[in-house]
Each structure stands twice: as structure tokens, then as C-alpha cells.
């Protein structure tokens, strides 16, 4: 996929370490993510991919190092993390929808409560986005009435309702039945085509190859290699990446 308008740095990660007891989940990670980039993070289980993603919006607090978002240091004491977090959409493996609220209520809650958007405007935007993902007919349904693939598309729409600057995806298809994966990847592909800045932790190598502007390979809490998908998958430089790709491709 061709990516246009990739420009200014949106997120800068400097010397991030994250320690759990004696173990370093992240060990001196440096990374820049530019506006309009679609960055996929791959690597074996336990390599630090999800921890890195969760550090970007401080769901995990780094042990040391700095993270900047739009030039503001997130890791500085006294920063209003919640205000900055509103600009970062996050989609998890599990959908975390409120079971007792309708889909439309799930989507309008945060814009109304956190951003002061009127009910009418919040509902209008939610319906526009539901239509975009082919689920406008489910607005009055409850989460229990939806399939896994539909719930995950709703989770993506819920993030988009906040008009984020970047979308973070933590293995968004890993909890889905195989036939539902395509529904979710289709929505993500459209977002990439619209130049939404995205950081995606995934095991879907074919999708990474097709959609990413850059792929990062992590192992043992460090970035081992990063490159365009064409280069990284076709000509892996490190033995560790060669070994990993031989098992997953």
C-alpha cells in the first residue's frame, strides 16, 4: 500500500525501559512515529510488543526514559495524561463494551462526558462511523447480540468517535474466529488508506506486509530491526529475525 503525506513526528520514544521485578520487558527502546505512518510491531510472544504499545499512552508507566506526544512530554510529572490520552485511540484484543448499554450509547458516552459534545452531535457522528463499518443497523442492539468481529469493529468506531490523532491496536484480531478476522482488517485497511496514524501489534504477517509503511521487529524488550515491509520480510538482516520469519511465514 502506498502511503502519502507521512510527515512530522507525532510520537517520540527515548530510551524507554520497563522493568517488572528483575525482568526488563523493555530495555532501552528508541522510536519515532510520524503523522500518517502505519507502524506494525511484530515479534515472538513476550518480546515486549504490547508493553511498548501500552507505554505509548501510559497504560504502563515506563521505569525510565521519555515519551513525547505532539511535542509534549507524557512522562513528565504533573502532565494531564487523560487529556493527551483522548487523542490516542486504543483497541485491545477484547472489546470492553458496556454490556448494559446499546451500541449507540457505548459510542456516544465518552465524547459527551469527556469532550462535552452534545447528544445530537455525538449520535450523528456515531451513526456516520457505524455506517462506514457497515453496522448502522446495529445501533440499538446490545453487545451480547453481536458477533466477535462486529464487537471489534464497534470498539474501533468507539475510539474514532473521540477523533484521535493516532490509533493504537493491540493484537485486535487474536481473540476472533478466523472468519471474522477479515471484517476487522478491512476497517483497519480503510483507516490506513485515509492516512490515520496507526501503531499495530499483530501476528497477521500478510496484513503487515500489505498495509504497513514500516515494520518493527522486537525481541527480548528491544527493537532488533525495522524497515519497510518489502525490505524487512524479503531481506531480514539479523539472524534472530530470519529465524522468527522462518517459523511464521
Image (tube, helix red, strand yellow):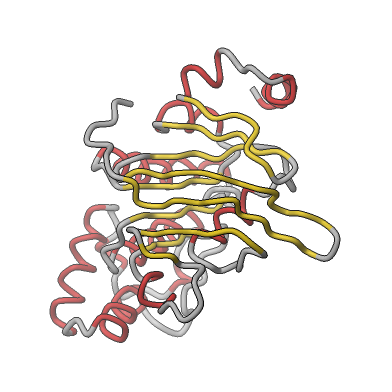
Can you tell which quarter of the image residue 70 is in? Answer: bottom left
Residue at image location 45% in from the left, 39% down from the top: 39
Residue 78 in the figure: left or right of residue 105: right
Q: Which one is in front, 221 or 185?
A: 221
Residue 109 in the figure: left or right of residue 168: left
Residue at image location 68% in from the left, 52% down from the top: 26
Query: Does 189 sit above or below residue 146?
Result: above
Residue 27 in the figure: left or right of residue 206: right
Q: Which one is in front, 204 or 162?
A: 162
Q: Which one is in front, 119 or 208?
A: 208
Query: Does 22 sit above or below residue 118?
Result: above
Residue at image location 45% in from the left, 61% down from the top: 90
Q: Position of residue 154 (x, y in %)?
A: 38, 62
Query: Can you say which quadrant of the picture contains the N terminus?
Result: top left
Query: Can you say which quadrant of the picture contains the C terminus?
Result: top right
Q: Position of residue 238 (x, y in %)?
A: 68, 20
Residue 232 in the figure: left or right of residue 107: right
Amino acid at each position: 500500500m502506498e502511503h502519502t503525506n507521512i510527515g512530522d513526528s507525532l510520537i517520540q520514544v527515548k530510551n524507554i525501559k520497563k522493568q517488572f521485578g528483575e525482568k526488563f520487558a523493555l530495555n532501552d527502546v528508541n522510536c519515532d512515529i510520524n503523522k500518517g505512518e502505519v507502524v506494525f510491531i511484530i515479534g515472538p510472544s513476550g518480546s515486549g510488543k504490547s508493553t511498548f504499545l501500552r507505554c505509548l499512552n501510559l497504560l504502563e508507566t515506563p521505569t525510565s526514559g521519555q515519551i513525547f506526544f505532539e511535542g509534549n512530554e507524557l512522562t513528565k510529572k504533573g502532565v494531564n495524561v487523560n487529556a493527551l490520552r483522548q487523542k490516542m485511540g486504543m483497541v485491545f484484543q477484547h472489546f470492553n463494551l458496556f454490556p448494559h448499554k446499546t451500541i449507540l450509547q457505548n459510542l456516544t458516552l465518552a465524547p459527551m462526558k469527556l469532550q462535552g459534545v452534545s447528544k445530537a452531535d455525538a449520535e450523528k457522528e456515531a451513526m456516520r462511523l457505524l455506517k462506514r463499518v457497515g453496522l448502522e443497523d446495529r445501533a440499538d442492539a446490545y453487545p451480547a447480540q453481536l458477533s466477535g468481529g462486529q464487537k471489534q469493529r464497534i470498539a474501533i468506531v468507539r475510539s474514532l468517535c473521540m477523533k484521535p490523532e493516532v490509533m493504537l491496536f493491540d493484537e485486535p484480531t487474536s481473540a476472533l474466529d478466523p472468519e471474522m478476522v477479515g471484517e476487522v482488517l478491512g476497517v483497519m485497511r480503510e483507516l490506513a488508506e485515509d492516512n490515520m496514524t496507526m501503531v499495530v501489534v499483530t501476528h497477521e504477517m500478510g496484513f503487515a506486509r500489505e498495509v504497513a509503511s514500516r515494520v518493527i521487529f522486537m525481541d527480548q524488550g528491544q527493537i532488533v530491526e525495522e524497515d519497510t515491509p518489502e525490505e524487512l520480510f524479503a531481506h531480514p538482516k539479523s539472524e534472530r529475525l530470519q529465524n522468527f520469519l522462518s517459523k511464521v511465514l
